[in-house]
Image (cartoon, helix red, strand yellow):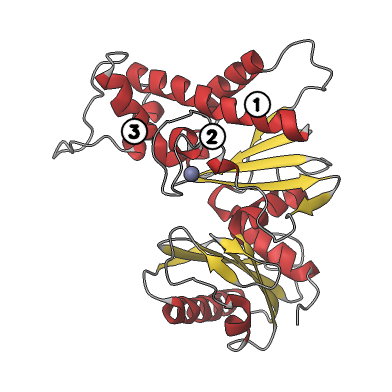
Amino acid sequence: MNPPGPITLGFDIGGTNIRGLALRTDQSISELISEQCLGDHDDIIQAVVRLAKEIQQLESREIDCIGIGVAGFVDNFGVVHTSPNISTFLNFPFQEKLQESFNVKVHVENDATSATWAEVQLGAARGAANVVMVSLGTGIGSGLYLDNKLFKGSSGYAGEVGHMTVVPDGLPCPCGRFGCWERYASGGSLGRLAEKLIQEGEITNLPTITKDGASRITSEHVAELVKRGDTQAMKVLEKFGYWVALGLANLVNIFDPDTVVIGGGITELGQVLLTPIKSCFDNFTPEDSLRKSTQISLARFGNRAGAVGAALLAKEAEPRS
Ligand SMILES: [Zn+2]
């Protein structure tokens, strides 16, 4: 039996999927429901409206407000200036347009900021005063919580850590630069790393797991082999841990956080992902550092973090107009 009182809806809008859930008054969370959406901003708004109705029917509760986390540069007024995977969002006043479809408050934030807030409020970073969260997805999203406050920068865009250079003249990045961290340490880069290690002879070919023997090795392929305990795939993961730890060590040197939270789909792998990251991280940070040791944890909310955090932020947000 769900608790009495209204629900808050949270949505996470990514490049191909819109996911939504309800946050209840006892802070329990409903199942995530999702809809594929590859259309323009009108299609996205209609999909949010449909999902909102569906969740409300499932929960049989009134809605008090709605939070939206969206992948992209979102300013402090809920305008999406650009989005790496959703080309329809170009200086688009998303919050204002969504608000026309709802008679409760709508609040739009960046998805990584939202995910960070979920982990700080209810998840792996609860109680910490300084938190860096990195989400290893197609790219690397990040949120910063410093001195007990979300840190968003002067325009709302802080935390683009995926584009810090880790290899001068390294792999090209869609941002136009070379050697960005996310080309080496995002969830999406795991397959590419495996291919490189095969080419260099560091590992032998990975076992094929698809019947048709797809020629490209995907990140999902490597992750599936890791789950099966394949030793070659484990070597890929160890190398991947090196690249993740390299960037984390840079961030920890800058921000001195209590806690680093690692999110993104790849964290389904659990402890087996964390072990190589932690051991490489220790090698990057001197033992006699003045800094107290940083806790590195996996996100609690997995692929629900963006939606949960968006709902929590909407509850607290002051109306923007
Ligand atoms: Zn880049």
Q: Could you tell me how far apart the alpha carbons at marks 3 and 2 are, in whole angstroms?
A: 18 Å
> For mark 2, does the 10 Å Cα neighbourhood hold few (<14), some (14 to 19), or many (20 or more) residues?
some
Residue wearing tag 3: 192
Q: Is mark 2 on a helix, strand or loop?
A: loop
- Where is residue 47? Give x, y as percent: 46, 77
The circle drawn on residue 249 is: 1
* Of pointers 1 and 3, the one earlier in the residue sequence: 3
Q: Residue furthest left?
A: 212
Q: Of circles 3 and 2, which is in front?
A: 2
Q: Is residue 137 or residue 8 the one in the foreground?
A: 137
Classify the position of the C terminus by image quarter.
bottom right
Q: Mark 2 points at which residue?
A: 165
Question: Looking at the rendering, which quadrant does residue 244 occupy?
Answer: top right
Q: Which amino acid does label 2 sit on?
A: Thr
- Disc 3 residue type (three-letter): Arg
- Which residue is at a point 29% across and 28% down the rendered structure image? 195
